[in-house]
Amino acid sequence: MLDYSALAALAAVIRAGSFEAAARALFVTPSAVSQRIRLLEEKIGCALVVRGQPCLPTPAGRRLCQHVEHVRLLEHQLQDSVPGLALDAAERVALPIAVNADSLATWLAPALAAFGAAQPVLIEVAVDDQDHTGEWLRTGAVMAAVTGTARAAAGCNSRALGAMRYLAAASPALIARYFADGVDGASLARAPSLLFNTKDELQARWAHGVCGRAVELPRHVLPSSEAFVTAALAGMGWAMHAQQLIAAHLADGTLVELVPGSHLDVPLYWHSARAASTLLDGLSQTIVNAANAALLPP
């Protein structure tokens, strides 16, 4: 049997980032937290925490943290069916999820906020490209994810959410400077573009579709959906923007599509662990409802 007081200490260290903060959360001394984790590491036979600022889990430590959160979900579910069960009503259950930045900046944040305000949970959001968030779920780092892949990992469910529409847009000044004679491979190879991070392929995909070939794009790197819009308005570069983020700027002419009608629609899916939990099911339904209201139909 696993020592659940030690597992709770491990989860607290990873969530809080340090042994001292975990000790305060658990109302014990830092040495007690350290001893519990040391004994757990001896029993498991490997390191579970990478000591640092902050402390991070090893792959085995991440799996054990995920196990703890699943147990807490099951306990919450059990309390629903056995009202007399004495559990700490004030304890919140961690629900780690991974999402793409554009969803978080548009339709997803209000849904998460409403759910987090109403339910006994602590939502932990990791941000990554939609083509890579599924990896967070496969490694056990999160319990659910908004992804760009229809096929879910083993032990997970997949539901289509809809599609986000992206438009290639820039300021009128940048278009006049680089695209006065039209958009082609030569002009795209000269004009600066914006890149969210090295995983971001939207600009390259759009350029390939317009030109019929790959184009080497000069680029600024800005890991923020809102910064993309700010930079585009200032004439720093062109980029693929979520339509919801720039609709007002397109309407007032402060941003202009490079090639009208040449949008990219990116399908999104909700993957969640198959845990018998009303909390996780409730979060999933909240996400699906928000997507139905904001995204293009699946």
Image (cartoon, helix red, strand yellow):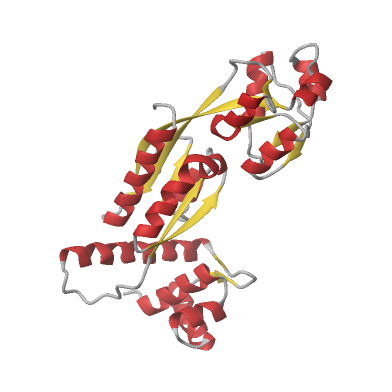
**Left or right: residue 268 compared with residue 277:** right
**Left or right: residue 81 compared with residue 257:** left
Q: Can residue 187 be seen in this view?
A: yes
At x 45%, y 49%, the residue is 137
Outermost residue, top direction?
A: 181
At x 53%, y 38%, the residue is 131
Instruction: Estimate the x, y position of residue 189 in percent, counting from the top left.
Output: 79, 23
The C terminus - image quarter: top left
**Left or right: residue 45 compared with residue 128:** left
What is the quadrant of residue 176 in the picture?
A: top right
Whether residue 286 is situated above or below residue 40 in the rendered picture:
above
- Number of numbered labels in the structure image: 0
At x 41%, y 73%, the residue is 7
Which of the two residues, 128 or 243, is positioned nearer the viewer here?
243
Instruction: Estimate the x, y position of residue 51 in percent, counting from the top left.
Output: 61, 73
Whether residue 164 is situated above or below residue 206 in the rendered picture:
below
Which of the two residues, 145 or 45, is positioned nearer the viewer here?
145
What is the quadrant of residue 92 in the picture?
A: bottom left
Q: Is residue 155 visible?
A: no
The N terminus - image quarter: bottom left
Instruction: Estimate the x, y position of residue 91 in percent, counting from the top left.
Output: 35, 72
Whether residue 2 is situated above or below residue 264 in the rendered picture:
below
Instruction: Estimate the x, y position of residue 140 in percent, counting from the top left.
Output: 45, 55
At x 53%, y 39%, the residue is 130
What is the quadrant of residue 73 in the picture?
A: bottom left
